[in-house]
Amino acid sequence: MSRLRRMPRRRSYDQYCAAARALDSVGDRWTLLIVRELLAGPRRYTDLHADLPGVSTDVLASRLKDMERDGLATRRRLPPPAAAYVYALTERGRQLLPVLAALAEWGAPALDERLPTDAVRAHWFAVPLLRALSGPLDAAGALDTAEGVVEVRLDEGVFHVRLGNGGAAPDDGRPVYGDGPAPRPDACLALDADTCRALGAGALTVADGVRDGRIEVTGEGALAKVLRGE
């Protein structure tokens, strides 16, 4: 007599509550950090594993399958010569950006001390920095009309973020940030990790950082001039 194979029951809080339903999909350990990585664009499994130090291969594979099942991510094969599989966020997955940004802002005070065991990647500062750049630069609101690509240079590495009209991260399906230098940045910011953390926490504005010499802005485009307060 054959036996039907039962699929494992999806874990759920079994509560008719929007927050509980959301946590059914993204409440597992590592899921939101995978979202953080995929906000930079499609990533191969090996790249995700490299930038998520501490996650096991089994857990990463399981979380990615869960994200596909819940409509947060898709898996597709790149055309030759790459011929590799990559994971990418769906539109619903990209809608988690403001959730991550709010979570990063709330958790920023816990970054006051970097522990010897803490791993760090420069692009992990991208999401909170996007939030810092989404508001007006000064009382005149100059940044409200700015858009373009900002390259950010830290001692820990280089990443770039993309601003849409109004300073907010654009919602057009393209990556909102990327690891490494930008091909043609509209402005470049040079600062240290503590300054970048202060920006993300809301303890420092771009204008104050530039005025105090904590942020160096280079570039000749409109966005660079706005960031310099010109």
Image: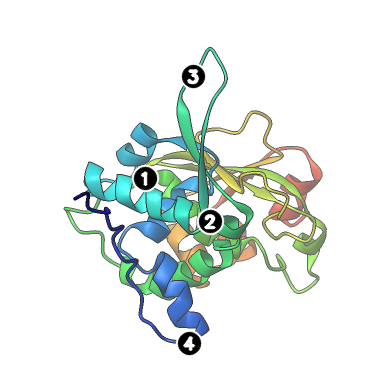
In the picture of the structure, the residue carrying the numbered disc 1 is 121
Residue 62: x, y in percent?
A: 31, 50
Pointer 2 or 3: first along the chain: 2
Residue type at mark 4?
Answer: Tyr
Q: Secondary structure at mark 4?
A: loop
Mark seen at residue 71: 2
Instruction: Please give the name of the residue rendered at 37% of the width and 36% of the height, measured from the top-left corner.
Output: 45
Choose between 145 and 195: the one closer to the eye: 145
Q: Secondary structure at mark 3?
A: loop
Q: CA distance from mark 3 to mark 4?
A: 43 Å
Residue 60: x, y in percent?
A: 30, 47
Q: Are marks 3 and 4 in contact (CB under 8 Å)?
A: no
Q: CA distance from mark 1 to mark 3?
A: 27 Å
Q: Nearer the viewer, mark 2 or mark 1?
A: 2
Instruction: List the single residue furthest toward the bottom.
Output: 16
Decide if residue 192 is in sight here.
no
Label 2 crowding class (10 Å Cα cut-off): few <14, some 14-19, many 20+?
some
In the picture of the structure, the residue carrying the numbered disc 3 is 83
Instruction: List the single residue furthest toward the top.
Output: 81
Pointer 2 or 1: first along the chain: 2
Pointer 4 or 2: first along the chain: 4
Pointer 1 or 3: first along the chain: 3
Q: Are marks 1 and 3 in contact (CB under 8 Å)?
A: no
Pointer 4 or 1: first along the chain: 4
In the picture of the structure, the residue carrying the numbered disc 4 is 16
Q: CA distance from mark 2 to mark 1?
A: 27 Å
Q: Are marks 4 and 2 in contact (CB under 8 Å)?
A: no
Residue type at mark 3?
Answer: Ala
Label 1 crowding class (10 Å Cα cut-off): few <14, some 14-19, many 20+?
few
| 16 relative to 141, above or below | below
Choose between 17 and 155: the one closer to the eye: 17
